[in-house]
């Protein structure tokens, strides 16, 4: 079963069209996402680096953006891998990471964004991207499970034992 996540910005960029975002730094009300959609924006850029937004506010804005049909992109407050995985788990479809100074910094950020075994991000089900539904994973030969997202690429999940 292929799972598709609507991503209006990505779709436009794949057609070589310009995609526009509304930057959110001061207004944390979820209504801003509906206003951005009505105004014709393709996405919302939630700026954690230059605002006082925390992960909870950021996640609420990302989930609201997903529900109105625009792409939530988040600028992380730092290159700390902790933020990258939490931002993605909270509903973002993309992350802009500041202060990358080396190849290793970039590799660490990518590893934090990708599920195991391709990265270090731990598996979770019921993400806001999938409207909190459980998505079945397909077993692979290395003991992990693999989910295939039609538009967003592969998702790898590790089996958990209780």
Image: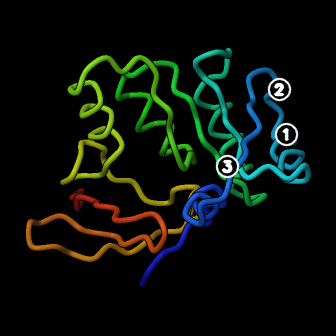
**Badge 3 local density, few (<14 within 10 Å), some, or many (20+)?**
many
User: Residue placed at 50% from the left, 33% from the top?
Assistant: 96
- Residue 45 in percent (x, y) is at 67, 36
Residue 25: which quarter of the image? top right
- Residue 30 in percent (x, y) is at 81, 40
Image disc number at residue 27: 2
Q: Secondary structure at mark 1?
A: helix
Gap in Å between the C-alphas at discs 3 and 2?
A: 15 Å
User: Residue placed at 86% from the left, 49% from the top?
Assistant: 34
User: Residue placed at 31% from the left, 17% from the top?
Assistant: 101
Looking at the image, residue 14 lies above or below residue 78: below
> What residue does disc 3 label?
63
Q: Secondary structure at mark 3?
A: helix
Q: Quadrant of the C terminus?
A: bottom left
Residue nearer the viewer, 74 or 59: 74
> What residue does disc 1 label?
32
**Badge 1 local density, few (<14 within 10 Å), some, or many (20+)?**
some
Residue 11: which quarter of the image? bottom right
Upstream in sequence: badge 3 or badge 1: 1
Looking at the image, residue 83 lies above or below residue 65: above
Image disc number at residue 160: none
**Badge 2 local density, few (<14 within 10 Å), some, or many (20+)?**
few
């Amino acid at each position: 079963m292929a799972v598709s996540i609507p991503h209006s910005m990505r779709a436009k960029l794949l057609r070589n069209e310009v995609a526009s975002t509304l930057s959110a730094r001061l207004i944390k009300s979820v209504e801003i996402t509906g206003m951005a959609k009505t105004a014709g924006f393709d996405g919302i850029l939630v700026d954690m680096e230059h605002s006082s937004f925390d992960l909870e506010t950021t996640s609420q804005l990302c989930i609201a953006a997903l529900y109105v049909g625009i792409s939530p992109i988040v600028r992380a407050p730092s290159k700390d891998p902790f933020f990258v995985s939490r931002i993605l788990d909270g509903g973002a479809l993309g992350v802009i990471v500041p202060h990358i100074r080396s190849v290793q910094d970039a590799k660490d950020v990518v590893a934090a964004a990708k599920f195991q075994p391709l990265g270090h991000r731990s598996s979770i089900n019921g993400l806001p991207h999938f409207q909190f539904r459980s998505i079945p994973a397909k077993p692979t030969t290395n003991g992990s499970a693999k989910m295939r997202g039609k538009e967003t690429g592969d998702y790898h999940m590790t089996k958990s034992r209780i």
